[in-house]
Image (cartoon, coloured by chain):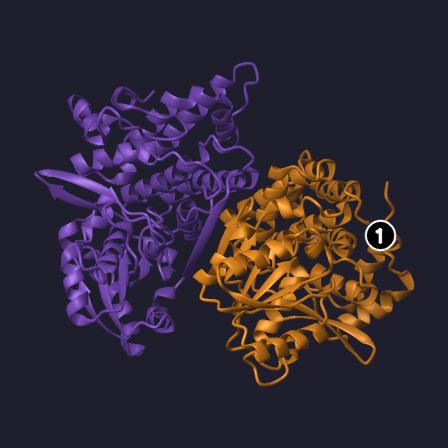
Chain colours: A purple, B orange
Amino acid sequence: MNNFNFCRPTDFYFGRGEENQTGEICKKHGATKVLIHYGGKSAIKSGLLSRVQESLDDAGISYVTLGGVLPNPRAELVYEGIKICREQQVDLVLAVGGGSVIDSAKAIALGVPYEGDFWDFFMGIRKPERALKVGCVLTIAAAGSEGSTSCVINREINGVVKKRGCGNQLNVCTFSILNPELTFTLPPFQTACGACDIMCHVFERYFTNTRGVKVTDELCEGVLRTMVQMLPRVMRDPCDYDARANIMWASTLAHNNLLGADREQDWASHHIEHELSALYDCAHGAGLAVVTPAWMTYVYKHDVMRFAQFAVNVMGCQMDYAYPENTALAGIAALRQLWGNAGLPLNFEELGAKREDIPVLADRIGDDDHTEGKFVVLRKPDVAAILTLAADYQRP
Amino acid sequence: MNNFNFCRPTDFYFGRGEENQTGEICKKHGATKVLIHYGGKSAIKSGLLSRVQESLDDAGISYVTLGGVLPNPRAELVYEGIKICREQQVDLVLAVGGGSVIDSAKAIALGVPYEGDFWDFFMGIRKPERALKVGCVLTIAAAGSEGSTSCVINREINGVVKKRGCGNQLNVCTFSILNPELTFTLPPFQTACGACDIMCHVFERYFTNTRGVKVTDELCEGVLRTMVQMLPRVMRDPCDYDARANIMWASTLAHNNLLGADREQDWASHHIEHELSALYDCAHGAGLAVVTPAWMTYVYKHDVMRFAQFAVNVMGCQMDYAYPENTALAGIAALRQLWGNAGLPLNFEELGAKREDIPVLADRIGDDDHTEGKFVVLRKPDVAAILTLAADYQRP
């Protein structure tokens, strides 16, 4: 087990109706003026935004609003948010939405007290030293941004969309309000994409070279088994409260780093996918459903028993003691079947990606010296090979 | 799944040598004057106290010391600590020790800013509104106090020792430093008592009537399986770092309420045991090894399938589909065997408790109207019956 530091001070409010406490929770955390940040019209139509505003009114907290966050959130809106916060002396950014809205809110919160360009933090030129508080009312279980240090923003530079992350303790939400009922109305495809993202956050930590990490391995497998059980349930009945609730809490646990603080982590699949969603503007979870099993197929021989353990403990496969490779491959096949049944794309064609873009995608990841991943260290030809596996995969 | 609030802001530093950062960590959290609180001479002899003091010196943080915390910590020393903190204008209480030392530090921290008697909080007369910060350098994996809201203090009133708890968000440590190596030198009996306490913190949450809590059930079973695997390892080799590390992190996870925030919890076994350790001054974990299996035997029929699930998923028993009761009982037997093999007492005689005290113990829990537990609601005759089962149990 590796040494680690772990600190996740987020104040979580979980369950039915908790969003009606938003005002009181903002007050508890010292907010006086809030920027309500949201995405499209669904937050308005569903009445969620009005309920949040009413709750702020009741608590005597004033607010301004900024909607329009897109999936794969853009830097342009972050600049607009920073300007509003400065002009209006906002002290807490309240994200009402999913991972993209929360990440946009986090980037605004980093940018407000910084004299330079917030993009410096995403280019790795500077480290943020302070930030406004961020709270959220979560509407989709997926990115885990409600409990994580992560923040990912897209920016177009010379006609190419760059997707860049800034991981920092300052990005941890002050509070997060999680009502599983708010996810009842999600389209099935978004639900499935979210589930895939959650599982992949665990995979990036589970497939590790660090030994002696039994207790966090157990947590990883437990969260994954929960997803394997709950994803089909919620696809059958989108209003299954317990299924939605288990998925929502799993999304937080999967990415607040409780499951990986003690180990070397991989993240190659995520980084490869970032280039897919930057190029095609596809859903991150959909891209992961295509990339991750291809990554697994490419690397499983590095630690066959780890993949066999995954197959048996998570996917419910039978152990083939004579040929553990068969077990490992059966686990990957079972994962694809789970995701395919949930309506996720499993290859380039289904994702809307093009085989001829593979060299471009591999180039965009980095130059010839660049490496990706830790479980197996990948170079450009490896990335191209993984993308080729992803392109070639045929459903059985 | 029940609605819940969950907030555990503790800043954890985990791994080899982390105690040498104590001074810097205190500084990071704004401490200027520290009360170092500790137990017996082992902290001095081992050199741990000197290392902590050196680290504080290096960081330019001044300190006073107060040793002498006993297992089942006493109110008298808490008063002394409060007096010192007020006189010396201490702003952080640093516990160097196990659960008893941390709990004593937490009680001091609650008492300092309160004008009345700190015992008010433990009698439920008043709720604490503020507290000094508490940090800890943990030396035994057991109570989980390093990450929990719990605090248990003993006080002699009219010749009878009363053991009382005060659960409060203010009791959450500001930081906790966990170096598994510091537990290498623990006597085997203390190691086993700690492991038993850890497992029982999970049991109090795992045996619940709340449904739809798959993800936290998975976390509970994962932490329990870790303990089932690691306890025999650490009894064989007390310097097995990974075993000690997994147990230490399990101790935090078992009691910071991540495993139970979403459900009704029981706590009857703990409350019954508190009367045993108050009367006999026995180790809490030893008392639990006697009480908990007796409680299980008394209540398992309330939810046979829950106990069968425990037997199969945690203790590795085979499911008897025709007679699930057999599986449930096999799980309890396997648990006793695990604990017995680790040198824990399994009945009154081995604990040093007396059968003739059963009426007194049952009386001390509460009057005739008093109930204990939630999984099964117990009254005084039930408590007496459980204690009788505990007294009668014979090793096979």
Furthest toward the bottom, the residue is B115
Chain identity of mark 1: B
Q: Quadrant of residue B263?
A: bottom right
How packed is label 1: few (under 14 Cα within 10 Å), some, or many (20 or more)? many
Q: How far across and down, in percent of the image, does residue A195 sit?
A: 36, 42
Q: How far across and down, in percent of the image, does residue B76 sit?
A: 72, 75
Q: Quadrant of residue A53?
A: bottom left
What's the residue at 43%, 55% (across, down)?
A8
In the depicted structure, whether residue A76 falls above or below residue B276: above
Q: How far across and down, in percent of the image, does residue A222 sit?
A: 51, 41
Q: Is residue B177 left or right of residue B230?
A: left
Q: Is residue B182 left or right of residue A23?
A: right
Mark 1 lies on residue: B347
Q: How far across and down, in percent of the image, does residue A159 sit?
A: 8, 38
- In the image, B68 versus A386, the foreground residue is B68
Q: Helix or strand or loop: what does disc 1 sit on?
A: loop
What's the residue at 57%, 76% (across, down)?
B88
Q: Is residue B204 visible?
A: no
In the depicted structure, whether residue A311 falls above or below residue A5: above
In the depicted structure, whether residue B373 falls above or below residue B196: below
Q: Is residue A367 left or right of residue A147?
A: left
In the depicted structure, whether residue A50 falls above or below residue B287: below
- In the image, B229 versus B299, the foreground residue is B229
User: Which residue type does callout 1 highlight?
Assistant: Asn
Q: Is residue B284 visible?
A: yes
Q: Quadrant of the C terminus of chain A?
A: top left
Q: How many marks?
A: 1
Furthest toward the top, the residue is A322
Furthest toward the left, the residue is A158
